[in-house]
Image: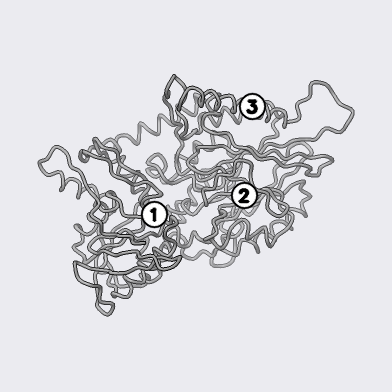
Amino acid sequence: MNHRKAVLSILLSFALFFSMLAGFGLQVAAEEEAVPVNLLILHTNDVHGRAIGDHGPGKDGFPIESGSIGYARYKTLIDKMKELNEDRVLVLDAGDCTHGTNFATLSQGQSMIRIMNDTGIMAMAPGNHDFNYGQEGLDLNVKEADFPILAANVLKADGSPLLEGHKVFSFGDLKIGVFGLATPETKVKSNPKNTEGLDFADPAESAAKEVEALKAEGVNAIIMLCHLGIDEESTYTSKYVLDRVEGIDLVIDGHSHSLLPEGEVYKDSLIAQTGNFFEHIGAVTLSFVDGKVTDKKAQLIDFAGAQQYEENPDIVSSIDAIEAENERFTSVEVGKLSSDLDGLREHVRTQETNLSDLILDAMLDATQADCAISNGGGIRDSIPAGQITMGHLLTVLPFGNLVTVIKVSGKDIRDALVYGTDAYPETAGKFPQVAGLTYKLVKNGEKYEVQDIMVKGEALDESKEYSLATNDFMAVGGDGYSMFEGKEQVQLEGLMVDILKDFIVKLMGDKGEFSYEADGRIKVEG
């Protein structure tokens, strides 16, 4: 980042800071007119385990341009805003926070919940990845939390709610109703075993009931805290709810990783979302006159803007203690890379990469199956050249999936490839990375067709039975791979991360380092 851009970023951050102060209704002198009462909602979504803030000077001594803000700075910001706004600050999280980094996963999310407790989070909606530790793990995190985890539409087999549906927060004379919703996509975007026996009701139907209940409690505003998103490929989005339910003043959303700098007005509601990975903090101001909402404004505090807040030392100490405990495992060395391994989100969800080839080849090597398929969305990071540690591998494969081998037909394989690529060239977590087989994506009009499928160098026979290595998430229909559901399991290996580790050790042999290249097993024409 050059000097001019860095100065501009800091000036913009201070402009945002002072505009927030103005929005908080601070007065130099009392006015005769009625002064709006303002409530500030600070919010995050899709933090994905990024508890630790990024550091380091950039060029000319300015902070690095972007990265994770972290809870230590967030705590300082929250405390400052409460001081400025007479404690009229509501702090919310829209889910997918307890999974995604070693910091989070090695404790099954409890480290994140403890830090969120200390930071001052006041309510959260569960994201699909917050179910990754199973119902028992979710229950432990709910009990660990000093704040409610809200989801009105998640029901047990007997129809009773798994979690609280809503909570009313009081700020002086203001009563703010917050209700939560979880995405029905959790059924396929977390391992289906994690939600066995649970029903994710239509979020609009659940929202309508919650709105009526909150109105009966006499609230001044209603906030929908949800992990639904606004992706057009999803059926149950926050807009789907707003199309069917009136009376929602504000939507604090997640799941689609959408960056909405000033929010998005839809129907009579304001939708706010911050992107992902703690690179922004959302700040929504609701203004009230005589108890009625008169104005809504959304803004974002970016990484550069957050640098004006010092890190809270207590949060730093807590994070350091957890990191020290984790390091005993994550620092174990596995091998050495002579070049980078590409696990970028936008790449592994649209194309073959050298890292995806390495992982799939490891699965095939461990199982000796005919071929292997695994979803690109399960690959969560790249590995830079240099020493590889268990920490790197756990960051790349954080889900704790096992490698399994199932019996499938050639038609099942074709159906899987067609399904997994139906969104191409758009990114999709279900995008099929492969080993032992090759295929082409050929453009036909506006769509791409799967052609020339080869298994072990021979054309796919749809009537033939094959042994397929995959992960246990997909083997039970995860990510929508219903063609694999119920297939006979003939082999169950260990954790994907351990199989990858063993394969890297095997590749290293007596060499001092190794590299891996993509070999063109997925080709695109047109």
Q: Position of residue 23 (x, y in %)?
A: 72, 32
Reply above or below: 411 against 477: below
SS class, disc 2: strand
Q: Earlier in the sequence, mark 2 or mark 1?
A: 2
Q: Are marks 2 and 1 in contact (CB under 8 Å)?
A: no
| Mark 3, other Cα within 10 Å: few <14 / some 14–19 / many ≥20 | few
**What residue sits right under mark 1 in the picture?**
349
User: On screen, 133 above or below 43?
Assistant: below
Amino acid at dot 2: Leu
Question: Which residue is denoted by mark 3 in the rendering?
Answer: 15
**CA–CA distance in space, label 1 to label 3:** 38 Å
Disc number lying in front (2 or 1): 1
Q: Residues within 10 Å of mark 2 (few under 14, many from 20)?
A: many
**Number of other residues with Cα within 10 Å of mark 1, as a class: few under 14, some 14 to 19, many 20 or more:** many
Which quadrant is home to the N terminus? top left
Q: Position of residue 293 (x, y in %)?
A: 78, 44
Q: Residue at x 46, y 25 (%)?
A: 2
Could you say where residue 178 lies in the image, as x and y percent from the top left?
A: 67, 48
**Residue 503 appears left or right of 159:** left
Residue 156 position by quadrant: bottom right
| Residue where numbered disc 2 is placed | 225
Q: Quadrant of residue 342?
A: top left
Q: Residue at x 31, y 54 (%)?
A: 352
Give the camera-side residue of 214 and 391: 391
Say which amino acid is labelled 3: Ala
Where disc 1 sits, the SS reads loop
**Circle 1: residue type:** Arg
The number of numbered badges drawn on the structure is 3
> Where in the figure is residue 184, as x and y percent of width and height?
53, 61
Distance from the alpha carbon under mark 2 to that under mark 1: 28 Å
* Looking at the image, residue 452 lies above or below residue 387: below
Q: Is residue 446 left or right of residue 405?
A: right
